[in-house]
């Protein structure tokens, strides 16, 4: 059996940044690495071409009566910039302080390696394991998965499984696992505001026209109330009510507000009334400004009235909000509130539907929940309790994994999301790392779950 840490190091060495064309070799290297590893475990591997980066479809066939699990992951990573903030080069994996440091170590190469290693160990002990497994690994997750939905629609006849298993969500502490049972959706857009046809001298022309930066700043300020709520009529109309068992699970989190505030490095929280910070990031939708620009950005001063100003906006959605409705409400507010003495355009970006699955034995568990999905939840609960020494928590998460809702809609499958990365793993930031103790325990949990499904 291969050493999963050494294989993870090899995986991280491939600079597989999907958003930047100069990393084409790294993308190809990462794809070939994963494909080769799965072939070595006996999987039939097909590399499905897309308009951008291929999808790996690796299958272990068997008796149709056997359980069938789809394991999802992605081999692409975020850009490593800014490079000068890394303590060690991002694509030269370094083992230090019980962690593996490098871009993609936690998102998502390390968690994906957990499940590959677990399957490898099981098959080494029992080559005839009565379990069908499909690995579905894409290379465009960090760009919004544009090829994934067409792939699902084309290949759904080969993806008739019982559920999807993945680890692309987090845990609060090394000793407390979370099984994620809800993810927020997304609506993203850019707004470009234009004043004059070119930049203007602020002394010669200031005072006779509206500055695009001012118009944009006033728009942004109007989209929230002072107490932190999103100030768009109808924005909260469809928000799903929180179940009592969800609040009970959240009460077991074990992290204090003071600890969370210290981790964020902020003097105080800014949370809508009636919600704790931990509730707000799981149960409420948001509207955030992800980037804003306009005018001179260099050293010193340049006294111009800029021709254009820009803002990037993202909304995180919760069940039962829909991207289509929220996009309409947001765009209507933008059109109404931007003044008529500037022009503007709204540029659509990608979106995602929120997702929720209710674990078995809850008050609102669907009566028709598939038996093998319930078995998987109970198996992962028992395995986490045994390996980590305490049972998992079942919580919604504030982040988004857009493909999960697509899988549910196209394939009709729910997902079991085993959290494995920690807040200090620095996803999408410099000095990303993956806790190797969590990795080894994660392999043991994954192995136990697969074995239980196979009846072993």
Image: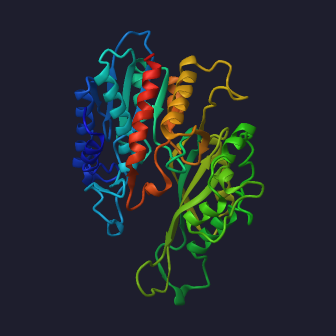
Count of labels in the image: 0
Going by the picture, which residue comes out furthest to the bottom? 203
Query: Front-most of 411 and 107?
Result: 107
Q: Quadrant of the C terminus?
A: top left
Is 267 above or below relative to 202? above
On the image, which quarter does residue 298 sit in?
bottom left
Q: Position of residue 254 (x, y in %)?
A: 63, 51
**Image colouring:** rainbow
| For residue 52, side relative to residue 370 (left or right) | left
Task: Look at 34% across and 39% down and name the residue there.
Answer: 113
Query: Front-most of 73 and 318?
Result: 73
Task: Look at 51% across and 26% down and name the residue there.
Answer: 410
| For residue 341, side relative to residue 146 (left or right) | right
Query: Front-most of 306 and 89?
Result: 89
Q: Quadrant of the N terminus?
A: top left
Q: Position of residue 280 (x, y in %)?
A: 67, 52
Q: Position of residue 77 (x, y in %)?
A: 36, 49
Q: Can residue 239 be seen here?
A: no
Q: Can residue 45 be seen here?
A: yes
Q: Position of residue 190 (x, y in %)?
A: 52, 57
Is 36 above or below relative to 331? above
């Amino acid at each position: 059996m291969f050493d999963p840490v050494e294989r993870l190091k090899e995986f991280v060495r491939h600079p597989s940044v999907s958003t930047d064309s100069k990393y084409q070799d790294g993308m190809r290297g990462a794809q070939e690495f994963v494909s080769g590893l799965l072939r070595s475990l006996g999987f039939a591997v097909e590399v499905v071409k897309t308009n951008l980066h291929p999808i790996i479809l690796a299958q272990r066939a068997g008796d149709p009566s056997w359980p069938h699990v789809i394991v999802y992951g992605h081999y692409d990573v975020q850009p490593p910039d800014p490079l000068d903030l890394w303590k060690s080069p991002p694509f030269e994996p370094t083992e230090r302080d019980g962690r593996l440091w490098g871009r993609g170590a936690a998102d998502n190469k390390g968690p994906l390696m957990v499940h590959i290693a677990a399957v490898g160990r099981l098959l080494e002990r029992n080559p005839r394991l009565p379990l069908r497994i499909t690995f579905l690994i894409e290379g465009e997750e960090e760009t919004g998965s544009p090829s994934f939905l067409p792939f699902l629609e084309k290949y759904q006849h080969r993806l008739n499984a019982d559920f999807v298993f993945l680890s692309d969500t987090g845990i609060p502490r090394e000793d407390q696992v979370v099984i994620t049972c809800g993810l927020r959706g997304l609506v993203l857009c850019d707004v470009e505001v234009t004043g004059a046809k070119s930049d203007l001298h602020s002394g010669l022309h200031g005072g006779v026209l509206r500055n695009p930066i001012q118009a944009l700043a006033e728009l942004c300020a109007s989209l929230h109330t002072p107490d932190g709520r999103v100030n768009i009529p109808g924005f909260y109309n469809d928000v799903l009510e929180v179940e009592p068992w969800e609040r009970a699970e959240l009460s077991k989190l074990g992290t204090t507000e003071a600890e969370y505030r210290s981790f964020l490095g902020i003097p105080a929280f800014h949370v809508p009334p009636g919600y704790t910070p931990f509730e707000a990031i799981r149960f409420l939708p948001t509207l955030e400004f992800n980037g804003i620009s306009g005018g001179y950005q260099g050293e010193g001063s340049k006294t111009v009235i800029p021709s254009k100003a820009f803002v990037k906006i993202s909304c995180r959605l919760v069940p039962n909000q829909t991207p289509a409705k929220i996009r309409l409400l947001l765009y209507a507010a933008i059109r109404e509130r931007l003044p008529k003495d500037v022009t503007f355009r709204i540029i659509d970006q990608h979106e995602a539907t929120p997702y929720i699955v209710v674990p078995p034995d809850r008050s609102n568990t669907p009566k028709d929940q598939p038996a093998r999905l319930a078995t998987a939840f109970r198996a992962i609960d028992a395995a986490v309790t045994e390996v980590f020494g305490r049972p998992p928590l079942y919580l919604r998460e504030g982040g988004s994994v857009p493909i999960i809702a697509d899988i549910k809609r196209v394939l009709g499958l729910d997902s079991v999301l085993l959290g494995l990365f920690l807040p200090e793993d620095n996803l999408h930031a410099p000095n990303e790392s993956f806790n190797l103790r969590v990795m080894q325990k994660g392999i043991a949990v994954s192995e136990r779950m697969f074995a239980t499904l196979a009846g072993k």
